[in-house]
Image (cartoon, helix red, strand yellow):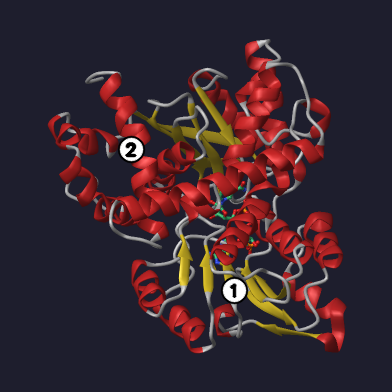
Amino acid sequence: IQRNPGETEFHQAVREVLESLAPVVDKHPEYADAEVIRRLCEPERQIIFRVPWIDDSGHVQLNRGFRVQFNSALGPYKGGLRFHPSVYLGIIKFLGFEQIFKNSLTGLPIGGGKGGSDFDPKGKSDREVMRFCQSFMTELYRHIGEHTDVPAGDIGVGGREIGYLFGQYKRLTNRYESGVLTGKGLGWGGSQVRTEATGYGTVYFVDEMLKHKGQSLDGKRVVVSGSGNVAIHAIDKVHQLGGRVVACSDSDGYVVDESGIDLELLKEIKNGHRGRVSEYAQARGADATYVSDGSIWDVPTQIALPCATQNELGAEGARSLVKNGCIVVAEGANMPTTPEAISLLTEAGVLFAPGKAANAGGVATSALEMQQNASRDSWTFDYTEERLSTIMRALHRECLTTAEEYGQPGDYVAGANIAGFIKVADAMLALGIV
Ligand code: NDP
């Protein structure tokens, strides 16, 4: 804490992982001897840079850019870029730290990193977003590459932004290096299923959790927070597997639609003009209720999927979920559940899946995009989804078997942290003190 003052979210993420690792260090003193944990908590490289750009009225605007290259023991740094006004070093470091373990859990050869900016794309014109992205990449391009560091999207960074970023990278380097970014459009090096992957993967994970308890998603009532990329595709997969999502949200409020969220309508509003869930409620008329000053976790549900942002599900929300009979909480977002809420949920017997396991499908499919780029190939939707589904099911099994092996059966948090850690720690030992 003294070494990284003020980085609250980073401290929270590190504490959560370290709390799981005591039994591992007892069993493997070699990790302590080589100071693996201390080295893991220190990013290999952190880049902070100025991003000046010109708005539509001709004024110079200024933002701050970040790329934290956390750990490359398993492969090139890999992790998204977040554009949101709340971004500062503590957020990027928490996301980068989580990414190390998540990427390790996928079993694919990718290290951990994260980046972004305090730029707010909301309300900006396409041209402004383009000029910002070009300026951001004008510094970032020196630090990335298909064998070095491969960024992708996150909050505020979708297909449009990846397009502008890739265009500027190509222009600056004079190289069509498809593997330098993932989340690209299908016509220019992108992978089928990448857009859907995080939401779909989260629901595959939930499906496995339920199956393990002899249940299924069929007929289950589900609440999904957020209405961005992860939320929309989580809703889609829940509906495909027979569940019913009755509520979703954005940062202004939430909507309850008892007959099940009409995904086509939601997509039209969100993807068409980046609209709000209040517009969804308006379009649905008497069938839906919009709440602007409440908590989505008060909506009774059997399954809760927080898919918006960090620390969005706190103690109050957890109490409501427990009271209303929730049986599963799985994190589509990164660290959306506070430590207190996790304790309340797990003590009440709610099955809890941490983001580094449940939302790993996004980065796993990014790694599949890298494989396709490296072999100049492109796979079908069905084949790619099958690969995603296999990865998520294997990841679920690994969390369970590792938790059991270390004396904490059924504890997905311990299972994910320990399994993710061991692979990285072993690689760090093998590579020497570097
Ligand atoms: P998007 O930008 O597409 O969507 C974010 C959604 O969350 C929007 O509905 C947004 O509402 C809402 N939101 C953002 N901040 C807040 C807030 N403070 N309070 C309430 N709602 C908020 O991002 P993604 O769907 O890509 O990402 C969502 C989460 O999933 C993040 O935690 C991200 O790190 C994580 N994730 C994403 C992956 C991906 O592949 N995209 C991969 C793995 C994890 P509004 O429009 O009002 O801001």
Question: Which residue in the structure is indicated by mark 1?
Answer: 303
Q: In this view, does 395 lie above or below 139?
A: below
Identified by mark 1, the residue type is Ile
Which x, y percent locates residue 66?
45, 37
Look at the image and tell me whether residue 65 can be seen: no
x, y percentage for residue 12?
A: 32, 57
The residue lying at 13 percent from left, 31 percent from top is 33
* Picture layout, residue 348 above or below residue 165: below
Q: Is mark 1 on a helix, strand or loop?
A: strand
Residue 393 is marked as: none
| Residue 99 in sight here | yes
The residue that appears at 29% across and 20% down in the rendered structure is: 430
Circle 2 — which element?
helix
Residue 384 percent coordinates (x, y): 73, 37
Name above or below for residue 59 compared with residue 226. Answer: above
Residue that extends furthest to the front in the rendered view of this protein: 214
Tag 2: amino acid: Ile
Query: Circle 2 is placed at which residue position?
Result: 422
Displayed-image quarter of ligand 1: bottom right
Q: Report the quarter where the C terminus lies.
A: top left
Asked whether 50 or 57 is in front, the reply is: 50
Percent x, y of residue 397? 50, 50
Depth check: give the residue in front, 100 or 266.
Answer: 100
Choose top left, top right, bottom left or bottom right for residue 383: top right
- The quarter holding residue 176 reads top right
Disc nearer the start of the sequence (1/2): 1
User: Quick check: 354 above or below 296?
Assistant: above
- Most extreme residue toward the top is 174
**Label 1 Cα neighbours within 10 Å, binned few <14 / some 14-19 / many ≥20:** many
